Every structure is written in structure tokens, then in C-alpha cells.
């Protein structure tokens, strides 16, 4: 018999693609991140990154139509806190979105583009898996130091 | 359930927005409406007091970006005060302190407007 001593924690939250569900998302993530051992500051960063990812899906993948579903899967193991967010909406090409020079961006009064920049700044890794017409997945990873 | 509240006070000639709770993609339209109403009535000097603002996401920051250019063209501005470290850190990550004046106290922010008017 194989013994697995790894600390594993798999949890899921399923929400409708409505901004009114963002509170639920934040509560779920902050509770789990806290339990995992992150400081309040880190909990805040992870929670904001997940909020931004869900907001992007609601806005861009589902274009504010609230009848769709977003799946959040938490995979917490060893020192890795990974959140996978799945949607079945419009695909996008992550490489096509240029990370702006924030100083220039802000000085020219641009309104958008902050969400993806924040996500990148708040967690250790952001990855995308886009299968056009099938599903889109965003992976947010934060390591417990 | 209301997890975001805006109170507007008139501290002649400035309007102070007191924000309380969570400013995200769900609550940002409410702030947008408040800004629009005030600007439509010809008020261009705004201080946003963030002492009770627990949370801000990029959707909230987008609201300030949507109005600040227009306000400045009309010789107005948006200034901020009483930010918690948590909220300031989000502003800072995006380089917003380059664009906005952020004060420790509301009074200082209001005075910056009134002093500029008197000079």
C-alpha cells in the first residue's frame, strides 16, 4: 500500500457569472488561504488576484451575461496554493495582451488593463490554458514561504 | 445586502466622498453614478476619504480613471485621504501615486483645494 504523506486539499466553488458573486469568491479564497498559513497581507493579495480573474471572465469571456458558470478549483499541496478558474466563454489570446508600462499607462489616463497587471503582481505565477470553443483556464499560484 | 456605501458631504467648495466597505466590479457602478451626478451639477473638486474603505479592485480604480481627466480639464481634481495600508498598496502597485495626490487627513486634502483657490 502506498502512503501519501503530502498535505493535500482540493476544494471547489461554482458560481454564476455575476459580479454579485464576487463576495462569495473572496470569502472562499480568503478563508482557505488563511487556513493554509498565509499572512493577512498575502491573503489579501491572493484574494484580490482571484477577484480580478473572475471579474475578467464575467466582463470579457461572458460579456456580462449572468447565466453562465465559473468553476474555481483550489488545489493546495505542500507549499503550493493553486487556484484554477475555468470558464466556457469567449477565448482570448493571452500573448496578444501586452503588459503596459504602468507609469506610462497611468499618465495617459488609460482606464483598463489594470486587472491582468495586478494579477501578475499579486501572485507568484499566472498561467493560461485556452482551448478555443472548449474552455479557458487561468492558473494562479502562490507559494507559502 | 449592501457591502458598499457612499456618503457625500459638502465642505464648501469641495465635495467629500466617504467610502465604506468593498469597492469591486459589483459596486463600482454605484460610485460611477455618484461621480456623474455630482459632475453634472457642476462640482469639480472632490476628496475621496478612504478611512472605511476595506477593499478596492481594479474595477474601482477604473472609476477614478474615468473621471479624473475630465475633472482636470475643468480645473477640478480628485484627491484622496485616510487610506489604509491595504488600499494604498493597490494604488501603489499600479503607480497611482504618480497621478493622484494622497493625503493623510481629509482636512489637508480639502485645504489643498481651498488654498489653491485663494492664491
Image (cartoon, coloured by chain):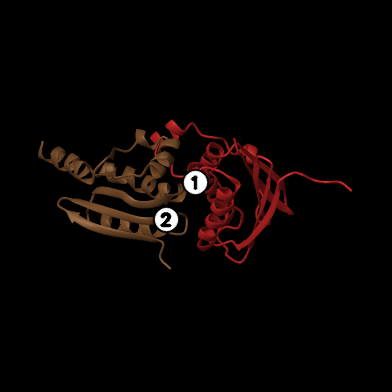
Chain colours: A red, B brown
Say which quarter of the image contains residue B108: top left
Q: Is residue A137 left or right of residue B110?
A: right
**B86 or B40, which is in the foreground?**
B86
Q: Specify few, some or many for label 2: CA neighbours under 10 Å numbering under 14, 14-19, or 20 or more.
A: many
Task: Indicate the position of residue A16 as horizontal and vertical percent values.
Answer: 60, 64
Residue bearing mark 1: A44
Q: Image height check: is A18 above or below A56?
A: below
Disc 1: host chain: A
Task: Indicate the position of residue A84 as horizontal and vertical percent values.
Answer: 66, 49
Task: Indicate the position of residue A59 as horizontal and vertical percent values.
Answer: 55, 55
Q: Are marks 2 and 1 on the same chain?
A: no
Task: Give the total of numbered labels.
Answer: 2
Task: Indicate the position of residue B71 as horizontal and vertical percent values.
Answer: 28, 46
Residue bearing mark 2: B22
Q: Residue furthest left?
A: B118
Say which quarter of the image contains residue B100: top left
SS at mark 1? helix
Amino acid at each position: 500500500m502506498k502512503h501519501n504523506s503530502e498535505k493535500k486539499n482540493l476544494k471547489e466553488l461554482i458560481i454564476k457569472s455575476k459580479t454579485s458573486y464576487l463576495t462569495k469568491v473572496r470569502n472562499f479564497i480568503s478563508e482557505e488561504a488563511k487556513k493554509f498559513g498565509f499572512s493577512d497581507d498575502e491573503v489579501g493579495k491572493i484574494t484580490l488576484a482571484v477577484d480580478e480573474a473572475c471579474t475578467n471572465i464575467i466582463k470579457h469571456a461572458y460579456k456580462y451575461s449572468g447565466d453562465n458558470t465559473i468553476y474555481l478549483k483550489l488545489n493546495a499541496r505542500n507549499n503550493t496554493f493553486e487556484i484554477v478558474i475555468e470558464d466556457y466563454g469567449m477565448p482570448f489570446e493571452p500573448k496578444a495582451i501586452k503588459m503596459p508600462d504602468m507609469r506610462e499607462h497611468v499618465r495617459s489616463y488609460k482606464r483598463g488593463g489594470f486587472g491582468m497587471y495586478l494579477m501578475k503582481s499579486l501572485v507568484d505565477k499566472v498561467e493560461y490554458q485556452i482551448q478555443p470553443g472548449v474552455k479557458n483556464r487561468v492558473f494562479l499560484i502562490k507559494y507559502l514561504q | 445586502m449592501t457591502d458598499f456605501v457612499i456618503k457625500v458631504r459638502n465642505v464648501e467648495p469641495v465635495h467629500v466622498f466617504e467610502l465604506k466597505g468593498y469597492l469591486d466590479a459589483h459596486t463600482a457602478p454605484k460610485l460611477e453614478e455618484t461621480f456623474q451626478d455630482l459632475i453634472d451639477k457642476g462640482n469639480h473638486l472632490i476628496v475621496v476619504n478612504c478611512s472605511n474603505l476595506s477593499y478596492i479592485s481594479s474595477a474601482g480604480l477604473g472609476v477614478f480613471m474615468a473621471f479624473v481627466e475630465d475633472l482636470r480639464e475643468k480645473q477640478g481634481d480628485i484627491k484622496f485621504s485616510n487610506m489604509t495600508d491595504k488600499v494604498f498598496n493597490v494604488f501603489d502597485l499600479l503607480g497611482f501615486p504618480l497621478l493622484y495626490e494622497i493625503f493623510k487627513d481629509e482636512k489637508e486634502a480639502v485645504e489643498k483645494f481651498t488654498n489653491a483657490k485663494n492664491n
